[in-house]
Amino acid sequence: MSRNKPGTVVLLTDFGQQDIFAGVLKGVIASISPESKVIDLTHEVNPQDIAQGSFLLSASYSYFPKRSVFCVIVDPGVGSDRKGICIKTNDYYFVGPDNGVLWQAANENKIKRIIHLTTKKYFLDSVSNTFHGRDIFAPVAAHISKGLEDIAILGKILEKCVEYHFPKIERNTFSLGLTIIHIDRFGNVTLNLKENQFRQFTQKRRFCLTLNDARIKEVYSSYAKAIDGELFLIGSSSGFLEISLKNSNAAKILGAKYMDKAQLKILDQ
Amino acid sequence: MSRNKPGTVVLLTDFGQQDIFAGVLKGVIASISPESKVIDLTHEVNPQDIAQGSFLLSASYSYFPKRSVFCVIVDPGVGSDRKGICIKTNDYYFVGPDNGVLWQAANENKIKRIIHLTTKKYFLDSVSNTFHGRDIFAPVAAHISKGLEDIAILGKILEKCVEYHFPKIERNTFSLGLTIIHIDRFGNVTLNLKENQFRQFTQKRRFCLTLNDARIKEVYSSYAKAIDGELFLIGSSSGFLEISLKNSNAAKILGAKYMDKAQLKILDQ
Amino acid sequence: MSRNKPGTVVLLTDFGQQDIFAGVLKGVIASISPESKVIDLTHEVNPQDIAQGSFLLSASYSYFPKRSVFCVIVDPGVGSDRKGICIKTNDYYFVGPDNGVLWQAANENKIKRIIHLTTKKYFLDSVSNTFHGRDIFAPVAAHISKGLEDIAILGKILEKCVEYHFPKIERNTFSLGLTIIHIDRFGNVTLNLKENQFRQFTQKRRFCLTLNDARIKEVYSSYAKAIDGELFLIGSSSGFLEISLKNSNAAKILGAKYMDKAQLKILDQ
């Protein structure tokens, strides 16, 4: 992004789309930096769900152009003393509340600098207590994408920011206690275990994943390899392990809910 | 917007997003003015709800770049003899059916000129009786954003247009009869009373807002100041008074529905 | 689209918008061709419903700028041996899985060339078994919209592709057996009969359309001509015949569901 070439602002929020919040963010950005490209990652994060926002951001950021500015608004603490921050990483900028939602993705891409947003000149003239997305985060993201050379000008340097870590895996020699961290539109159930961690743990031994009453013993490399009606594991496009059901909805059949627990056991001990 | 710099078209409709209507509008605009920027305000206005469209437009238009063209399609009378109009105001253009949906925002921004859209050269070649958004309003908005100098060329000058006013406040010395004009995704309940009107009326005296079985006696300047589980009033980002519930859904708890009535009483008489 | 003027990519998928899939497609396209315009047609095709995707594409493609690239992802067979293809037609490019979803629109616009996508240089570096939209179709669409002169470079020429035809009309002298091929947000019910086919068949004779318990005997040229509460037929903006109910939801009143059958009979025999 040279000084003359405005970049991309990527929006990830819990605003939904039945309201004007997401549209207003784009109005604000277009007013400040008319030539920036704006991309909706999604506005359907569960209201105020930092864990889900964090997962969706970390599963997708790397597919965006370098120097993209992620403007992430999942902000239960708006109007409290939680900080607004900008994190510069190896390839990207992340702007939003300092509540952990930015951390997972930023940390993966290597954090270079964290700024506490305090320079009011980069905010809207009037800042409300209820909509910092519109009044602070979108304006700051727009200014960065317009070609701000040094983000230090946005406020004060911070040594660290709030971290959000995915639910911990409970590890035993022959079993792992896992958690559902996402369910997608197709009913695919994402677990907090990367596919390569799964391969390392199972080492091609027979296994059984227990979730509610179901026992799942197969892992496939594509949906097409499964039989209709059969629950199976698959390495998903996000890198995490998923439970899937060919041409049907695994989550519904399983009665699986976000943050439910599952148990992975090695059968060949 | 100089002749050479296409501007922004902002879309506000009741088309939803599960269908192709909104996408087709963008295809039509891109065909006529490929370099115009198109922003979705929202497509989720309740079907044919002029009151809600009017509220959402007036709460958001001022955040968009000057000279933006608002293309608003909430159009229960499509195919009848209701007119299609373009309103030029101090800073913006508003294009849509003459049923009141444009009026509130246009009036606030000061109406300069109203044109009845009759010049067929700015429509699609073939105009249906069921989809004027595609055949008339989007093409006209595209032509304006492309750099039309004088909108009089679009048709005939009108002296006035249909007005939609928000539900009237019933005023007594010590009480106000209010109406719910919006409920957002988070369950915040918007009343037809501006925050500054509220301050003027209550004059720091104790008050009680009654809605269904609830009595609300607190007003805060930010969500963060409230206690979990407590219903309270707050001046929202739209300028109107809202009923809110910290980290929860006020509308659900209240059983509040769009257009329900509420009573605000002064207790210190 | 000259070499120097990137074009438009139009997205039609069954990804929904509550997830990051659609956003990631745009990230991939922006990374390859930052100046391409991207338009969402809709992401709300019923999961894996090729028939509906086919209908929505054929009802809308002609409203987009010539040389637009339609990137269509309704892909139950991802990871199987179904091919990925690009179809060049008179005015457009269609990219997606070879399962019939592209065929109806491409055929209408006259197919010029079909390419089996095999040249890996136009894919993402790493191709998953579960998300060809991200790894193959979006990258290919981005490269075409960026200004690829000859699509033969994308792979191998195919003689034909998989065809999806709308449900067949059962024809008798005085009756037609019809199928519901779409229901829109407003409850309008689309039948697999073009308005001009209807006119040709009924020849201004009295008719009766039977669907569940309802008998519909009127056809109007606009919603405005109907009486409140009356079910009627109308030529819709897609060119197909629709059942409608003025200012109300015809599908709900009828209990009509997608793919349900209806009978059209001539009464003047």
Image (cartoon, coloured by chain):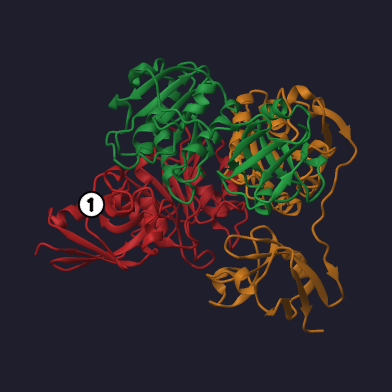
Chain colours: A orange, B green, C red
Q: Residue furthest left?
A: C269
Of the pair B261 and B81, the residue shown nearer to us:
B261
Q: Which residue lies furthest to the bottom in this view?
A: A268
User: Image quarter for residue A235?
Assistant: bottom right
The picture places residue A201, in percent across and down from the top left corner, at 79, 71
Q: Is residue A93 visible?
A: no
Residue for point 51% across, 51% down: C43
Q: Is residue A98 found left or right of B46 in the rendered image? A: right
Residue for point 24% across, 45% down: C221
Give the amino acid type for the residue marked by disc 1 in the picture: Val
Mark 1 belongs to chain: C
Q: Is residue C45 found left or right of B213 in the rendered image? A: left
The picture places residue A18, in percent across and down from the top left corner, at 56, 45
Badge 1 local density, few (<14 within 10 Å), some, or many (20+)?
some
Residue for point 66% across, 29% down: B173
Of the pair B144 and A234, the residue shown nearer to us:
B144
The picture places residue B97, in percent across and down from the top left corner, at 39, 32
The picture places residue C260, in percent across and down from the top left corner, at 35, 67
Vertical comparison of A167 with B121: above or below: below
